[in-house]
Amino acid sequence: MAGGFAVDAKVAGGRREFKGKITWYVWLCGLVAATSGLMFGYDVGISGGVTSMDDFLLSFFPAVYARKHRARENNYCKFDDQRLQLFTSSLYLAALAASFVASILCTRFGRKRTMQAASAFFLVGTGLCAGATNLAMLIVGRICLGVGVGFGNQAAPLFLSEIAPAHIRGALNILFQLDVTIGILIANIVNYFTSNIHPAGWRYSLGGAGVPAAVLFLGSLVITETPTSLVERGRRDAGRATLEKIRGTADVDDEFDEIKSACEIAAALREEERPFKRLRRRESRPPLVIAIAMQVFQQFTGINAIMFYAPVLFQTMGFKSDGSLLSAVVTGGVNVLSTLVSIVLVDKIGRRKLLLEACVQMLIAQSAVGGIMWVHVRANNNPSQGWAVAIVVLICVYVSSFAWSWGPLGWLIPSETFPLETRTAGFSFAVSSNMLFTFLIAQAFLSMMCYMRAFIFFFFAIWIVLMAAFVVALLPETKGVPIDEMVDRVWRRHWFWRRCFADADADAAKIDSYC
């Protein structure tokens, strides 16, 4: 009777609270796993600064160096070079492919081992990039870094969502995005100082990526695997012991029973149908569509175009090299501080409100930047200092809104909404979608800026309007819902997505009629 009552309460919508406390060990595990975001963020921030350094351009892209210093070169086209863009974007193409391999590794070997593999690839890639003597060696190094990013971005958000108590899952998961922003800031600071070290400053910048990779590798030796992953791989005793440790109590029967139940259902469904094939089912559509859409929209805010190429962008606006790097440091600092806002608010006011507020703020900032650049930044003249500072302020306004919304929630929501049987496979589509569109933006942005000029900002503003409509109509709230109850308490109750479960419910009723 007790078991039956628990099921009825869950279906009726009663909020289930598992026993336990927020332990220091949970936060330790979260901080170590989030270091994967530090690796990712450092690379996002370092590439734009390095591609603006003269010593780097002379070594690998002399044609771009010549255009950069040509007296009357078009401001918008100084850095338009497909090979230069490939330096940045090749990492994300490798990460796209690696994310599917990482999905299999996460299921078979666990989230922890996958993060260790990520740090190993990142260390190899760092050595190749920092020691590069030709473009081919540089690109191979970037590909190794990409494998590390693909593995880390797949495993870390899942790890964080699975160890976190439901009521702080948002805050703990956003540690990943916080570390991304800290990585970007550190990279901008490193670039600011190494830009004055000749001729090897760029080597120090690229070599710095090895520090977060080493921290993740060493830290992963002292953290645990998630209880879900241990039970999923048949290690129930270890799974329970780990759950007791991270919850700080031996009274974990209810939560452990739910994890076991989810793993048993997942195992049965995987025997019947492989996870990637199961994602083609109608009932798998809601979290899959949301996961992919969140990543596509995250990139079409234009954030990575700004973060990758911030120093280049600020040089286009008329800043000198040091000034452009310093402006990038300022925007990186805003990025970090604003992500802290998300950690505080995400489990209090929910995901949807943060996303919608940010859409309004980003739309205003992007449109204003586009308008100023259209009027004051021409092909062969720079804006006045006052307008240039205004652009930097508006970009900071834009970055702040992204940092407490689409940045962290783009990773949080896909990591918490898939059922266990398709969680790693489904999240790999989120990671790969992110990497695909990051690749496209990184590869195309400098060329787009050359041809579209100021209208590039209006292009991203149009996408922001579409994002807001998507959140209003199709994105359900997931605040406070236990991770293994998403299907019953979120998807089956949503006005649109519930229709995806009609066939599954009919099949279940048919099975019950035979029993």
Image (spheres, rainbow, N blue to C red):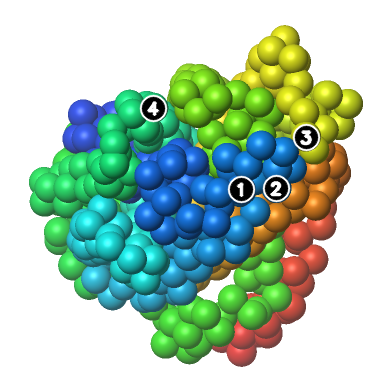
Image location (x, y in percent) of residue 286: 68, 62
Say whether disc 3 or disc 2 marks the residue closer to the N-terminus. Answer: 2
SS class of the residue under badge 1? Answer: helix
Say whether disc 1 or disc 3 marks the residue closer to the N-terminus. Answer: 1
Q: Is residue 101 above or below residue 383?
A: below
How crowded pointer 4 is (Cα within 10 Å; few <14, some 14-19, many 20+) is rated as many
Residue 454 or residue 490, whichever sits in front: 454
Q: Which mark is residue 380?
A: 3
SS class of the residue under badge 2? Answer: helix
- Asked whether, in this view, residue 142 is left or right of residue 483, the answer is left
Can residue 126 be seen in the rendering of this structure?
A: no
Say whether disc 4 or disc 1 marks the residue closer to the N-terminus. Answer: 1
Q: Is residue 399 above or below residue 422?
A: above
How crowded pointer 3 is (Cα within 10 Å; few <14, some 14-19, many 20+) is rated as few
Residue drawn at 52 percent across, 48 percent down:
65
SS class of the residue under badge 3? Answer: loop
- Identify the residue under disc 4: 192
Q: CA distance from mark 3 to mark 2?
A: 10 Å
Marks 1 & 2, CB-CB < 8 Å contact: yes
Foreground mark, 1 or 2, reads: 1
- Asked whether, in this view, residue 502 is left or right of residue 404, the answer is right
Residue 48 or residue 339, whichever sits in front: 48
- Identify the residue under disc 1: 67
| Circle 3: residue type | Asn
- Identify the residue under disc 2: 77
Residue drawn at 67 percent across, 58 percent down:
444
Q: CA distance from mark 2 to mark 4?
A: 23 Å
